[in-house]
Image (cartoon, helix red, strand yellow):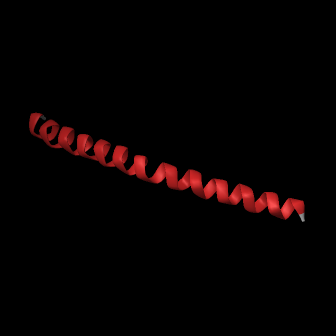
Amino acid sequence: MTALFQIVVPVVALLGVVAFIGGGILLPLFEIQEERDAKASARKVAR
């Protein structure tokens, strides 16, 4: 049980760090993409 715990904790911590860094990079990209989509749909509506 303790051996499993010693394996799981670092893996979860590592995944948390990767998710945090990845989120910091990916979230702005998604927001930029959404802004582009919003502008594109606004143009379609204007036509």
What percent of the width, then of the height, locates residue 31? 57, 51
The residue most toward the left is: 3
Estimate the x, y position of residue 39 in percent, counting from the top left.
73, 58
- Would residue 5 appear left or right of 30 to someone viewing this image? left
Question: Residue at 72% across / 55% down in the picture?
Answer: 38
Q: Residue furthest top?
A: 2
Q: Nearer the viewer, residue 18 or 4?
A: 18
Quarter holding the C terminus is bottom right
Q: Residue at position x 66%, y 59% from top? A: 36
Q: Residue at x 9, y 39 (%)?
A: 3
Q: Is residue 1 above or below residue 35?
A: above
What residue lies at 22% left-to-right and 45% top-to-bottom?
Answer: 11
Q: Quadrant of residue 37?
A: bottom right
Q: Is residue 22 left or right of residue 13?
A: right
The one of 5 and 20 positioned closer to us in this rendering: 20
Q: Quadrant of the N terminus?
A: top left
- Quarter of the image for residue 41 reads bottom right
Q: Nearer the viewer, residue 4 or 29?
A: 29
Q: How many numbered discs, if any?
A: 0
Query: Which image quadrant is residue 2 in?
Result: top left
User: Residue 6, how many percent across, how many down?
Assistant: 12, 38
